Amino acid sequence: MNREQKKFVKRVKNRFLFKLFTITKLPLAFISGLKVLDLDENQCSTSVGYKYLNKNPFQSTYFAVLNMAAELSTGVLALLATKGRVPSVAVIIVSMKADFQKKATDTITFTCSDGEKLFRAVDKAIETKEPQTATVATVGKNENGEIVSACEFTWSFKERS
C-alpha cells in the first residue's frame, strides 16, 4: 500500500473520523449507524444494527439499510484501491445483485474479501488507459454466524484525464 492508502485506512478505522465523514458525506449511513469494523488491502467488514430507524413493518432490518452496509464493505475497498494513484482514477458503481436468505433481526456484519480484484482492476485501468470493471462479493451474517444476505457489486474504474 502507498502512503495515501495507509492514511485512508487509518482514517476509516478511526470511529470519530468515520462518523464525521458519514455526517458530512453519507448522512443516511450516519443515521443508520453503519460502522467499518476492519479494513486492509484484502478485506473490509462493516456492520449495521437492528434499531428503530432501520426496521421495516416485518420486524426486520429494511433491505435498503442492509444494501448500504453491503455496498460500504465493497466501496471502501474500491476507494482504497484508488487512493494516491498517479494518474488519478475515478470509481463508480455500475451494478449490484442481492440475495436475502434470512430475516435480519440483530446486528449484521458484511465482509468483502475481494480487495485484490479491485486493486488489479485499478492497475489495469492505469496500464491500458481503458475503463475496467471488477465484480466483488460480500456476505452479511447475523450474530449467530448465519448468512442473512449475499451481494455482488460491480465497480468501474477509469483513469481521469
Image: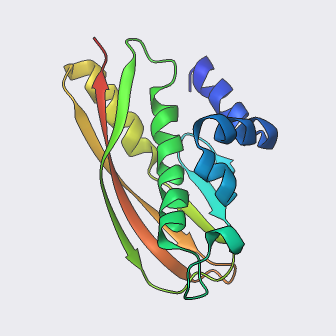
| Place of residue 122 in the rendered image (x, y in percent of width and height, measured from the top left) | 35, 30
Number of marks: 0
Picture quarter containing residue 129?
A: top left
| Place of residue 25 in the rendered image (x, y in percent of width and height, measured from the top left) | 59, 36
| Place of residue 149 in the rendered image (x, y in percent of width and height, measured from the top left) | 47, 75
Residue at the (62%, 45%) spot, across then down: 27
The colour scheme is rainbow
Left or right: residue 97 compared with residue 9: left
Q: Quadrant of the C terminus?
A: top left
Left or right: residue 39 compared with residue 64: right
Q: Is residue 141 above or below residue 64?
A: below
Left or right: residue 42 compared with residue 30: left
Q: Is residue 124 above or below residue 43?
A: above
Q: Is residue 50 above or below residue 126?
A: below
Residue at the (58%, 83%) spot, across then down: 146
| Place of residue 118 in the rendered image (x, y in percent of width and height, measured from the top left) | 39, 40
Picture quarter containing residue 111?
A: bottom right
Q: Is residue 34 visible?
A: no
Q: Is residue 47 above or below residue 59?
A: above
